[in-house]
Structures are given as C-alpha cells and as structure tokens.
Image (cartoon, rainbow, N blue to C red):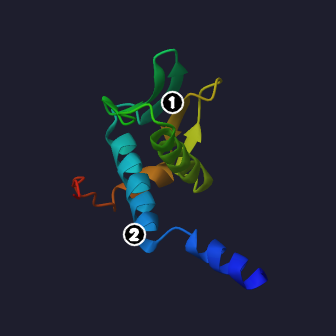
Amino acid sequence: MGHRRAENEIQSLPSEAKIKQVEENIKRLLKEISKDSNGTLIFTKSVTGTHITTNGKNLCNTQEPREIAKWKSAIENLIDEKLIELTGRKGEIYTISDLGYTVADTIEVFPEVEIW
C-alpha cells in the first residue's frame, strides 16, 4: 500500500507547465506593480468580491476561489523574496521594494495567450 500512496503523491505534484505558469504570474504581478505610479498593490475584499489592483488594472478578473488563490500565492511569493512589503495596517496595501524594482527591470513578460 505504501508504494501506491507514493505513486499517488507523485502524480498529484504540479507539472512543470503548471509551475512555469505560477512563475509567469509572479513575474507579471511584479512587473505590473513596478509600472504603477506609486509602486503599490492593493488587495481588498468586499461584498462585491476580491480585488487585486495595481497600475490601474484589476488583476483578479473573476471571483473564483482558484483564481483568487493564484494571486494570493503570487503576493506571498513576492513578500517572501522581499520584492514587495506590506505597508498598510489592514493587510491591504503592498509597496514594491528597491530589490523589487531591480528584479522587475530584468523581467520580460509576454502577453497571455489562450490555449484551446
């Protein structure tokens, strides 16, 4: 039984394509924050849903939990890498760091393409 469980755990790991997509989302988010005139990201929850905004864009275009989780994960990764920092008292406002600007300047982000 242990062998079958190990196989199931391996199969449930993210594929390289999924990992690459997560990395692209993190890059895209950092690049957008670096383009914002104030270098900020605003993460809010209200009765109308969750909003993740920067550079005049609402990046969370859906209220699906999976999409929200994707963006929350990207924010957490940027915090962990010290590329952005929490500046608001309610956990809603984040500001790009000097390191974040430096990294963002090296990122080339390609337009999103729908795959059928």
The tag on residue 30 is none
Side of 105 where 63 appears, left or right: right
In percent of the image, x 48 and y 23: which residue is there? 49
Q: In this view of the protein, which residue sits in the foreground, 12 or 84?
A: 12
Question: Which residue is situated farthest in the bottom direction here?
Answer: 3
| Viewer-side residue, 96 vs 28 | 28
Q: Are marks 2 and 1 in contact (CB under 8 Å)?
A: no
Q: Residue at x 47, y 71 (%)?
A: 15
Q: Secondary structure at mark 2?
A: helix
Residue farthest front in this picture: 1
Disc 2: CA contacts within 10 A as few (<14), some (14-19) or many (>=20): few
Q: Is residue 15 above or below residue 77?
A: below
Rendered location of residue 13, percent (x, y) = 57, 70
Label 2, label 1: how far apart the Cα atoms are: 27 Å
Assign a secondary structure to mark 1: strand
Number of other residues with Cα within 10 Å of mark 1, as a class: few under 14, some 14 to 19, many 20 or more: many
**Which circle marks residue 43 in the picture?**
1
Q: Is residue 110 left or right of residue 26?
A: left
The quarter of the rendered structure image containing the N terminus is bottom right
Amino acid type, callout 1:
Phe
Quadrant into which the C terminus falls: bottom left
| Residue 33 horizontal/vertical position (percent) | 39, 41
Q: Residue at x 21, y 55 (%)?
A: 113
Mark earlier in primary sequence (2, 1): 2
Q: Nearer the viewer, mark 2 or mark 1?
A: 2
Residue 94 x, y percent position in the rendering: 53, 35
Looking at the image, which residue sits at the far top? 47
Q: Is residue 60 above or below residue 98?
A: above
Question: Label 2: which residue?
Answer: 17
Observer-nearest of 26 and 112:
112
